[in-house]
Amino acid sequence: MPLDRLFRCFSSLRLTVALLVLGMVLVFLGTMAQVSMGLYRAQNEFFRSFFVYWGPPGAAWRIPVFPGGYLLGVLMLINLVAAHWRYFRPDWRKSGIVLIHAGLVLLLLGQFATDLLSVESTLHLREGEAKNYSEVDRRVELAITDVTDPGHDRVVAIPQSVLQRSGEVRLADLPFTVRVLHFFPNAMVSARPAGATGPPPATQGFGPQVQLTPLPHVTEMGKRDVPAAIVELLTPAGSLGTWVVSEYIGQPQTVTVSNRTFTLAMRLQRIYKPWTIQLLEFRHDRYPGTEIPKNFSSRILLTDPRNGTRREVLIYMNNPLRYGGETYYQASYDPDDQGTVLQVVRNPSWLTPYIACLLVSVGLVLQFSIHLFRFTTRSAQP
């Protein structure tokens, strides 16, 4: 039967060995690729994909040449479940094996859930500064702020995932439509040189004063792409012109529509929180007589008006703050030792690896104990 042969194939030990070998090869290739691709791109192309693709330099096409991390993980999960279903027979003496297999399944599912659900961002604070948001390092957003009321700003943000699709974006809170004419994944925006020929990239704001130069994708560690876009604002009465938006333009650009004033600014994507974190003190301790770091820590004040929380917390290496489903790690600091950089991780499945390892450990101990008990019982018999 074809289905029986397929089931035997998925539950075979040969497939298990083949998948483990392919996994080791994938880890080796992905590690080597980090030299030229960088960490984040290598992770996405080798481990967070179903296939690893290859294509000639400069070509617009690529073909799958090797199974990716997601495909190997799915096959390992199917192989584990199928083998358990094929060979397992209900017996209390094999209860430890059941726990071991359950732990391995949970470990695979937990890693997949982590890749899909976890969000990493950073919180950069100077001493005395307080923020209620963190920023995603490698994604931007176009922030359109209504500054008509001096005492209250209303912000509408268009994320990078929408900007890079181009087209029109209609938002109920805005009296105009945003049309994304061009999106550049990485581009330099600099002052337009005197005597430059050709039209400027945009007609409004800083558009006539700058030039926009597309750049290749950045793969080096410690660096990132700086996206830019050319947008047009449309009203029922017609176009208001075009703007260049980029992080290189440090000042917001202003437009007035229907007696309301708006600013446009490209910035790192923000994740707002209902609580505030203030940096009270940052310490960078060094070994006496050297510049070798010994420890760096952040003393912060956490304020949550929802439940009246107001407490000081010391964050340092291997001692993060966990609050509201997020974990704050001490990641870096400013060169002048007056500011800190906290890594913020929201991972709903963070407990699954611990539970999986606990199940595997209990299963190993239980299975060993069962065999030991049977062995000692048999040895005691005359």
Image (spheres, grey):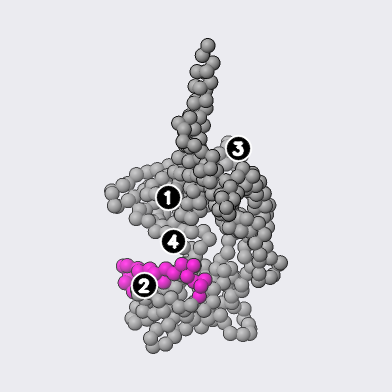
Instruction: Describe the element under mark 2 as helix, strand or loop.
Output: strand
The image quadrant of residue 38 is bottom right
First along the sequence among labels 3 and 4: 4
State the residue position of label 4.
270
- Disc number lying in front (1 or 2): 1
- The nearer-to-camera label among 3 and 1 is 1
Amino acid type, label 4 = Arg
Residue of label 3: 289
* Looking at the image, residue 21 lies above or below residue 238: above
| The quarter of the displayed image where residue 194 is located | bottom right
Amino acid type of the residue that numbered disc 3 sits on in the rendered structure: Gly
Kind of element beneath mark 3: loop
Label 3, label 2: how far apart the Cα atoms are: 53 Å
Label 1 residue SS: loop
Q: Is residue 370 left or right of residue 188?
A: left
Q: Which residue is mark 1?
A: 348
**Disc 1 or 2, which lies upstream in sequence?**
2
Badge number at residue 115:
none
Q: Position of residue 165 (x, y in %)?
A: 51, 73
User: What residue is shown at x 56% (from left), y 72% (from top)?
Assistant: 184
Q: Nearer the viewer, mark 1 or mark 4?
A: 1
Q: Position of residue 159 (x, y in %)?
A: 46, 67
- Mark 2 residue type: Asp
- Between 165 and 226, the residue placed more toward the observer is 165
- Are dots 2 and 4 in contact, CB under 8 Å? no
Residue receiving disc 2: 146
Q: Is residue 162 magenta?
A: yes
278 or 115: nearer the viewer: 115
Task: Classify 81 as above or below 240.
Answer: above
Q: Are marks 1 and 4 in contact (CB under 8 Å)?
A: no
Report the magenta residues as a range: 143-166
Q: How much space separates mark 3 and mark 1, taking CA atoms?
A: 44 Å
